[in-house]
Amino acid sequence: MPKLKAPKLTFDQAIVMLPKEFQPVERASYHRHKLRANSPMGIVAFSASKEYNDEKVWWTSVFPPEDEPEITFWIIALDIRGILVLPIDIIDSFCKKNNVPKLSSGKWSIHLKMEGQRILMYYTDSFEDVSQYFISSLLS
């Protein structure tokens, strides 16, 4: 019997969930990273994550700021549970401090996991609690 994949939030569902200081959100025209939008808080880019074996562990990839300096926030969808709205400086600092390697695409590979009620960004034995950036979905 094939394993069913967890439902995912779409880009449009995710940008509607952004806090009021990000509104109004205007979807940007096509770009190298096509899922991006303009907001009063800056340019936001969307990345859907992939869950590992229903273990509440996710993986995604994001451009570092030197490659895409205009992006100020990454919206990372954690299936239908909700989104993380991570400032690029949090990602940049964590990846550089922990020597997170880049993929062949030039993106950083970001890993997230739920530990109790916390959401952690991690690499090997280093982690950072990013729970404060989580916005729960009403769909879950």
Image (cartoon, grey):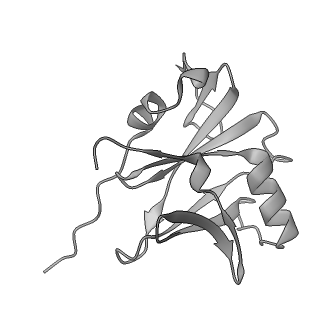
Establish if 64 lies above or below 97.
above
Q: Which quarter shows the N terminus?
A: bottom left
Q: Nearer the viewer, residue 7 or 28?
A: 7
Q: Residue furthest front?
A: 117
Residue 69 horizontal/vertical position (percent): 82, 38
Establish if 139 lies above or below 126.
above
Residue 58 horizontal/vertical position (percent): 49, 67
Residue 61 horizontal/vertical position (percent): 62, 59
Q: Nearer the viewer, residue 1 or 49?
A: 49
Q: Residue furthest bottom?
A: 125
Q: Nearer the viewer, residue 136 or 34?
A: 136
Taking the spot 83% from the left edge, 58% from the top edge, the residue there is 93
Taking the spot 44% from the left edge, 37% from the top edge, the residue there is 14
Q: Nearer the viewer, residue 31 or 134?
A: 134
Quadrant hosting residue 96: bottom right
Quadrant hosting residue 25: top right
Residue 135 horizontal/vertical position (percent): 48, 43
Q: Residue furthest top?
A: 24
Taking the spot 60% from the left edge, 50% from the top edge, the residue there is 132
Q: In the shown orientation, is residue 23 left or right of residue 123?
A: left
Taking the spot 63% from the left edge, 23% from the top edge, the residue there is 38
Q: In the shown orientation, is residue 133 left or right of residue 55?
A: right
Establish if 78 lies above or below 35.
below
Q: In the shown orientation, is residue 134 left or right of residue 82?
A: right
One can see residue 4 in this view: yes
